[in-house]
Image (cartoon, grey):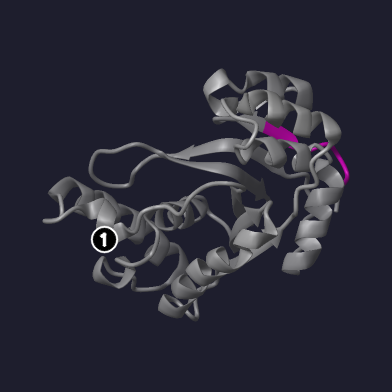
Amino acid sequence: MNETQPVLALRDVQKPDWPTLVDAYGDADLNSPRRSTVPLLAYWHDRIPRFGRLLHQLGLETSTPPKLSFEHPVGVAAGHGKSSITDLMIIAASTVIAIEAKYTEPMYETVRAWLGQPPQQNRCTVLGGWLSLINKATATSLTMNSVLDLPYQLVHRTASACFSQATHRAVLYQVFDAAHRDRYLDELRKLRALAPEAPLALGVLLSPAVPSDSYLALCASWDT
């Protein structure tokens, strides 16, 4: 891998260096020390060796430096709704890797719950747009009924990874608390079962967070 510094971006706006990128996060992004944004930024501070290790784990190579796009937005492909905001989208030559950070978050609602009862027409249209992105990029045939029990977040994050042209795609949960690993693996296995032949890597990047003394002090201060 070329060890030139990666291109950095936050919300699709390029940043010149790491301190500038971190400073660009707003108060709402870091309104708790237990948000997954905290360990995500701590982990990817060492971005060159981290990216090289990830490529090796995925069995991929690239000769060009990647773009690390944090809080990466992808607009809805149909209907009206909010963009899908992926915690970290890595774009390198013909490779796209969508990474969703997980630390203390609760489980997200399923597609069935998100659609409502009866299903809202615009939400059905939005979901259809996400599925069209996935189906076109991976030659699969996912339908609304087939994904009802998947987390809605997983569907639109997968669609986001399928938005750009690429030969290799991956959707990863980066899990910072090993106790939650199995539940995220279960979600990915459900998606894989629906699209067993899809050229899309799915996995958990287990990165157990080891709290420093200063972080523990911050949490204690926050709790009081």
Task: Where is residue 5? Give x, y as percent.
Answer: 83, 36
Q: Is residue 151 left or right of residue 63?
A: left
| Residue at (78, 48) in percent of width and height | 64
Point out the stretch of residues depicted in magenta: 3-8
- Which residue occupies 48% across, 67% down? 187
Query: x and y percent of residue 184 in the render?
Result: 55, 63
| Quadrant, the N terminus | bottom right
Q: Nearer the viewer, residue 22 or 182?
A: 182
Q: Is residue 37 visible?
A: yes
Instruction: Check if residue 4 falls in the magenta segment.
Output: yes
x, y percent for residue 8:
70, 32
Residue 17 visible, this angle: no
Q: Is residue 213 above or below residue 120?
A: above
Q: Residue type at mark 1: give it.
A: Arg
Is 52 magenta? The answer is no
Would you name the residue on which mark 1 appears?
Answer: 112
